[in-house]
Amino acid sequence: MSTMIPRSKLEPHPDNPRRELGDLEELAASIKARGVLQNLTVVPSPGDPEKYRVIIGHRRLAAAAIAGLDELPCSIVEMSHTDQIATMMTENMQRNDLTISDQVGGVQTMMDLGEDVKGIVEKTGLSSTTIRRRVKLGELNQPKLKEAEARGATLMDLVAVSNLTKPENRDYVLEAAGTNNFSYRLSEAKSSEKIETEFEKVRPQIEEWAKIVSPDEWGKMGVGTTYVRGVTIGAKDADYTKPKEPKETGKYVFVYRGSQYATVYEIMLSENSAEDNLKRQEHERKRQKKQLQLDACEEMRNRAYALRLAFMEDYHPSKEHTEAIMEFADYVLVNCPYDTIDGELEKKILDARTNPSMLYKLALHSWLKIESKYNPLSYDDHGGKYRDNDKLNMVYASITSFGYQMSDEEVEWNSGRHKCFTGPFIIGEEDAE
């Protein structure tokens, strides 16, 4: 049933999930010419019995004000407060009118009113996956989420951030969502959390025979230590056991760097002269500093490879990239070692030149075989020093022509300005040389 209600007696719903109504000029012009053709859905206002709150039709109400319309056709209904929010949220989501942050806000409002996920699903008709994702996104820093969305971050980008465990990691990655640094930061944070999880599993085993310290704590220790072994957290051959043959005291420290790499040291005999201990400590500082740099280079090398791999595997070639694909295929054929690509695969690549999609897949498959067999390409010389790499330059030139965006970290790596080359690699309060 339609009832004409004066615009002065209609008010926007204070809990409308949709915060921005968008451009109203075209709708206002249509209303001015033809009037409001679809009823607004309203409920009696709890604050004023002579007024009504709009449930469906907020844009029409605002546009009618611009058009100078005094009355609007309305359907008056009765519904609970949670049903009102559910109706507004469902209506807008069906038309894709709600931003992700608006959706999160709507779900959170319903939960604040006592609804659980099951209840929200029943009231909105939305899937439990949709609602659970919005609940999870509600755990993110909401101002940062809105900023990320404004930069172009997708729903799946934000879901990936919400799956991180640590709030500081979520904020760190969220700040890059919608930029070319997002994939790098997400990979960095996921790797960090995975390593930390792996380390916590073996921490009790290590604490049975060693004191676990940070590099900074190790650098400030007042006793001499000597290197025993390096440990790669999570590696299949990682050794978390007590050394079988002590060199001197049989007392150990396990230096955990908060990354994939750790080091075991043995505490030296206290009767060693202060001068000997100082020399030994200085030697270990230098060794540890160099190891930190090598670890940083390896971490960058592997992360950059993982990003390239993920992009190349998801990439779908198009005709506009035919020339670039052919250049990439030619490069692969010229640079493939004889023991990586056999004659049959080489013939397939040559025969696929009239099919860009197949050509790309074959060339990519071949190139990934090269990198997997001969280690990821890198801009370091595996000794911690920067070295330009023509092969890696070609790979980046190819995939950027396909649409890949290098992160700031990769750009700095490419130019030799990355922290894996420049540091700082400081242990303790001083950077001992």
Image (cartoon, rainbow, N blue to C red):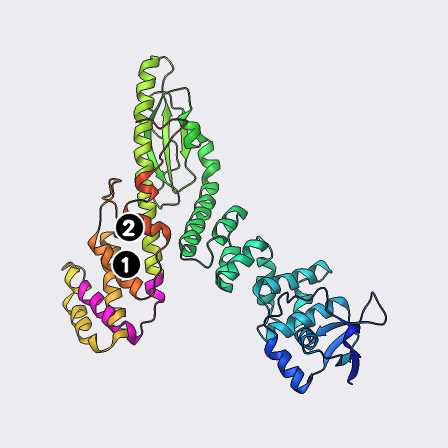
Secondary structure at badge 1 equals: helix
Q: Residue at x 22, y 49 (%)?
A: 388
Q: Is residue 378 above or below residue 246?
A: below
Q: Disc 1 to disc 2, how far (Cα)?
A: 10 Å
| Magenta residues, dominant SS class | helix
Would you call the spot at circle 1 few (<14 residues within 10 Å), some (14-19), or many (20 or more)?
Answer: some
Q: Viewed as shown, does residue 141 lie left or right of 383?
A: right
Q: Residue at x 54, y 54 (%)?
A: 144
Identify the residue position indicated by label 1 in the image. Answer: 396
Can residue 245 be seen from the camera position used here?
no
Quadrant of the snapshot with the C terminus: top left
- Which residue lies most toward the front here? 68
Front position in the image: 402 or 268: 402
Identify the residue position indicated by label 2 in the image. Answer: 414
Which residues are the magenta region? 311-331
Q: Viewed as shown, does residue 181 lie left or right of 413?
A: right
Amino acid type of the residue tagged 2 in the rendering = Asn
Do labels 1 and 2 touch, CB within 8 Å?
A: yes
- Which residue lies most toward the bottom here? 34
Expressed as whole percent of the image width and height from the top left, the position of residue 389 reads 21, 51
